[in-house]
Amino acid sequence: MTPDKLVCFAHGKESGPWGIKIKHLAAIAREQGFDVMSPDYSQSVDPDVRVSQLIGLAPKARCLVLVGSSMGGYVSAMACETLRPTALMLLAPALYFPGWDREPAGIPDLCAVVHGWGDEIVPYERGLRFARRHKAALHLLDSDHSLNDKLPELGRIFASVLEQAAVQ
């Protein structure tokens, strides 16, 4: 049975499907009546293999929200053209790296990017570039790549995205 509202997470290169951020955000999603899925992408470090895996899972819902962190941000953004989500939220998205620097297509109008000023792995300028190109809401926080020290702020931003997505 297809759920009415679904959040599909994509974790980062070296994390797992139920890390600190995803657990925190999944609880918020469930509170707002969303079903949650968080596939395990750890069998491959190739971002395009992960994109194919997400597309192959074919998550469907009247209201589909994709959320990706780091490499998972690339995965979620690149899957938009096929999956056509209602909303997209990217956390320190690993976009525009050599070899996987294509511009994502099919980005929904409801899109938010959260990046840390002090991100030592993915420079915040990449999130800024994506946000500018796709007219996404951009939230720059005083944090590092993990953003784990900003869970309350992430939660508020995410809750707002879900509220807007649910009424579209």
Image (cartoon, helix red, strand yellow):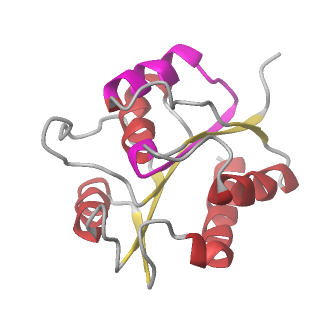
Q: Is residue 133 left or right of residue 70?
A: left
Q: Which residues are magenta?
A: 48-72
Query: In the rendered view, would you say 157 is above or below 149?
Result: above
| 74 or 42, nearer to the observer | 42
Residue in the image at 43% along x and 43% along y: 13
Where in the figure is residue 51, as x and y percent of width and height?
A: 41, 26
When asked about the image quadrant of residue 98, the answer is top left
| 156 or 133, nearer to the observer | 156
Residue 113 seen from this side: yes
Residue 164 seen from this side: no
Where in the figure is residue 160, as x and y percent of width and height?
A: 66, 66
Residue in the image at 70% along x and 64% along y: 159
Q: Is residue 27 left or right of residue 39?
A: right
| 48 or 88, nearer to the observer | 48
| 19 or 112, nearer to the observer | 19
Task: Examine the structure image and report whether residue 109 is included in the region drawn in magenta.
Answer: no
Residue lying farthest bottom?
142
Q: Is residue 117 left or right of residue 40?
A: left
Where in the figure is residue 81, as x and y percent of width and height?
A: 38, 28
Where in the figure is residue 145, as x and y percent of width and height?
A: 42, 67
Label total for image: 0
Task: Examine the structure image and report whether residue 54 is included in the region drawn in magenta.
Answer: yes
Residue in the image at 42% along x and 30% along y: 79
Residue lying farthest left?
98
Residue in the image at 25% along x and 63% along y: 132
When asked about the image quadrant of residue 49, the answer is top left
Quarter of the image with the N terminus in it: top right
